[in-house]
Amino acid sequence: MSESRNPEEFYAKLKKQLQDTAMWPAEYLYKFIVPTKGDKVNQVESIFNDMGAVIETKKSKKGTYTSVSINVRMKNPDAVIEKYMEVAEKVEGVISL
């Protein structure tokens, strides 16, 4: 997700795609890449606590980064985007895919 250019435009496009491709509420798969060092993985996981999310993590070959896949039922496209924004705000160095 290249939100560095224009986040509002990116999220508007994402919302339209989500509205057009799914019946809500629906399962949604988030994917993030975070630096393995520090508490970044736990920070991402804590944002999805108490939502019934299925979370899988996998370290990169060198162990520098960890991919975090989160499958969770979301009520609508706005809720999906809110979580992306929350992760971007709270977890330094995160890459959203």
Image: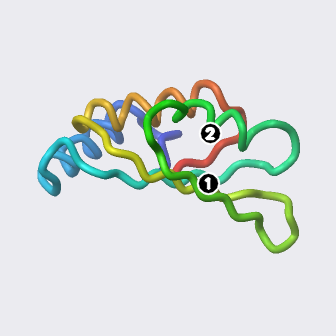
Q: Residues within 10 Å of mark 1 (few under 14, many from 20)?
A: many
Give the residue at mark 1: 68
Q: What element carries label 1?
A: strand
Relative to 63, say whether 70 is above or below: above
| x and y percentages locating residue 76 in the rendered image | 22, 36
Relative to 34, say whether 90 is above or below: above
Give the residue at mark 2: 45
Question: Marks 1 and 2: in contact by CB < 8 Å?
Answer: yes
Give the residue displayed 56% in from the left and 33% down from the top: 87
Relative placement, left or right, of 51 versus 61 is: left
Relative placement, left or right, of 11 versus 77 is: right
Amino acid found under the numbered disc labelled 2: Glu
Relative to 80, say whether 31 is above or below: below
Q: Residues within 10 Å of mark 2 (few under 14, many from 20)?
A: some
Q: Earlier in the sequence, mark 2 or mark 1?
A: 2
Q: Distance between the residues labelled 2 and 1?
A: 8 Å
Give the residue displayed 39% in from the left and 28% down from the top: 82
| x and y percentages locating residue 7 in the rendered image | 42, 34
| x and y percentages locating residue 96 in the rendered image | 54, 48
